[in-house]
Amino acid sequence: MLDEARVPAASGYKQATAMAVELVAVMANAAVLKLHDPELALSNWLTSQDGKYAIGKQAVAHAATLGARTVNDAVESNFGVHDNVVKTFGTICPENASGITQQRHIHDFAPAPHVMFDLRHKEGPDVLQKAVLGLFGRLFENMQESLVEMARRNLADSRTRARHNVDEQKEYKKLRRLDKITKLLNATIDYYANGLELFDAWKARGAKDAKQVDAQLSNLGSEAAKVEYLRNEIEMRVVGLGWQQFRATSLSTTDTNVCISIFLYIYHI
């Protein structure tokens, strides 16, 4: 499909190429006009439109957030943080990765009040606020020690559960792979059996030369019947003889001439 989109080979796709290019140009122009519409909020973010939120007017904020792994969407940011955690710690278990992702998102362990947060998406441009010390840092010292001690004592059990969960996940993936292999094997067997049947059909009733094709077509009245006859002849060769390069994917009742051309080309190859 992508090859056809890049370099059309089928006659129908070739005929539609010019119209498709024209439609793409119209859609692109409409998108540009939409972005530049001063009545819409989109233009506020474009430097070319001198938008009040454009990055060209936020040099300080831009410099302060270079390299930050974040997005404006709270849901998508969770996925981004989780992906970063998993890639950074390749052997981390799912529970620990989830915990780190959650803590990075809600900042319970934020240690440094000198860190600056960008709040433009909430309060407007140029709004930077110092980070508030995380919940853990605001607890009494004995409560902090209690939490650390609980985590230390539960470490061994947590690792055991984590290994068990990882093993379960591996087993699940293994069963999924086996199921997929079984389905592919069954499909291969079905295809092979169908190929044998069509090969036998070709030996029994397949047309052996162009005269037989003409004779059979002359006995068929409707265009639909002719197309169906030629479709069967092509299928007997494509599947029964394994000539996949001549597979015809879409033959309708208006494609009689196409069917004849394909069949004759296959026969005389």
Image (tube, helix red, strand yellow):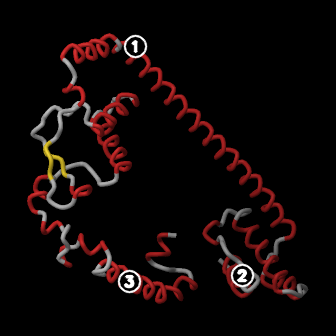
Q: Is residue 165 left or right of residue 139?
A: right
Residue 259 is marked as 2
Position of residue 26 relative to residue 142, above or below, is: below
Residue at 74% of width from left, 51% of height from top? 190
Q: Nearer the viewer, residue 107 or 97?
A: 107
Whether residue 205 sits left or right of residue 246 in the image: it is right
Separation (CA) of disc 1 from disc 3: 60 Å
Residue bearing the label numbered 1: 157
Instruction: State which mark lies toward you, 3 or 2.
Output: 3
Residue placed most toward the observer, 167 or 121: 121
Task: Say which residue appears at 31% left-offset and 13% top-offset.
Answer: 150
- How would you rate the neighbour count of disc 1 (Cα within 10 Å): few for under 14, some for 14-19, many for 20 or more? few
Q: Amino acid at mark 1?
A: Asp
CA gap between label 3 and label 2 equals 42 Å
**Disc 3 element:** helix
Placement of 167 over or under 75, stated as above or below: above
Which residue is the site of mark 3? 30
Q: Amino acid at mark 3?
A: Ala
Q: Nearer the viewer, residue 135 or 210?
A: 135
Task: Name the disc covering residue 196, or none.
Answer: none
Disc 1 element:
helix
Please say if 241 is above or below 222: above
Residue at image position (19%, 51%) is 118
Q: If the image is split into quadrants, where does the C terminus sit?
A: bottom right
3D distance between C-alphas at marks 1 and 2: 69 Å
In the image, residue 28 sits, relative to residue 186, either above or below, namely below
Classed neighbour count for the residue bearing mark 2: other residues with Cα under 10 Å, few (<14), some (14–19), many (≥20): many
- Residue 200 position, x and y percent, is 82, 61
Earlier in the chain: of badge 3 and badge 2, it is 3
The residue that appears at 34% across and 43% down in the rendered structure is: 83
* Crowd band around label 3 with a 10 angstrom C-alpha radius: few (<14), some (14–19), many (20+): few
Residue 49: x %, y % from top left: 20, 78
